[in-house]
Image: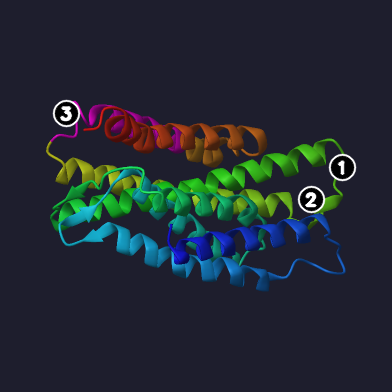
Amino acid sequence: MTLIAILTIALYLTCSGLLLRNLLNYSKNEPPHRRILIFGMSAMILHGILVYSGMHTAQGLNLGFFIVLSLVGWLVSLLLVIVTFNNRVESLGIIVFPFAALTVLLQSLNLEAPVLLQLDSGLKFHIVVSIFAYSMLSIAAVQAALLYIQDTHLHNKQPGGFIRALPPLDTMEKLLFRMITLGFIVLSISLASGLFYLDDILGQRMVHKSILSVIAWLLFAILLWGRWRFGWRGRIAIRWTISGFVVLMLAYFGSKFVIELVLHQ
């Protein structure tokens, strides 16, 4: 493992630990300090360097399981920091940053042979959009998990502790659906570009990923329709969000794990 990888992991975990400490010690007179995110942002810069150097090689683009997982970890962290500019949801970093640190560790251990591909611009566009859609909906899933904890505490009439550090429940729900809407739009673009640029979208290697991706798209479509038509919120929205994310995770990383690390194809 390189020094830059060790430093990246240390910065991610430091940021996560400080966010957790501030959350547990929260008081209205002393809200969490956003400057803590400087550790996470520093880690992101180093993480980005690691991902770029790992993906771009002289022989082609490396799209191995762990390098792509590391890219997703970096993107999720980046999206979180962007969202915190206008929303006090830096507490999501308690989950997101350790996940990003884990992806750096797995990338650095070199557990797999590089998966080198020569791709045209159309396929590169499809891959980038797909990974961005997955990252955006990953943030939505983390937000849904936090929303579930907040909703449970409020229903049990336990609004104290770190729950007070979170935005109001309505604000959290609105932010959740903004993330889902954006992620759904990008996922739609991903599926459309796949139909256009992939020749074997229903081939043996792609059929499971394609079917699961469509199922995930339908789950998020039904959720957004239910929100618009029936005002779905709370536990219903959380269940549909988590379900859609799990199916999407299986679509991409599940199939990629089996093909590359189990079947070695």
- Residue, x 17% and y 56% (percent of image)? 60
* Magenta span main SS: helix
Q: Amino acid at mark 2?
A: Ile
Q: Mark 2 highlights which residue? A: 163
Q: Is residue 84 above or below residue 216?
A: below
Asked if the stretch drawn in magenta spans residue 155, the answer is no
Q: Are marks 1 and 3 in contact (CB under 8 Å)?
A: no
Per the rendering, the mark at residue 158 is 1
The tag on residue 203 is 3
In the image, 173: left or right of 157? left
Q: Position of residue 224 (x, y in %)?
A: 49, 41
Q: Nearer the viewer, residue 249 or 238?
A: 249
Quarter of the figure that contains the N terminus:
bottom left
The location of residue 104, given as percent across then percent down, is: 46, 54
Q: Which residues are magenta?
A: 200-222
What's the amino acid at mark 3?
Gly
Q: Residue at x 28, y 42 (%)?
A: 191
Given residues 55 and 139, the one toward you in this image is 55
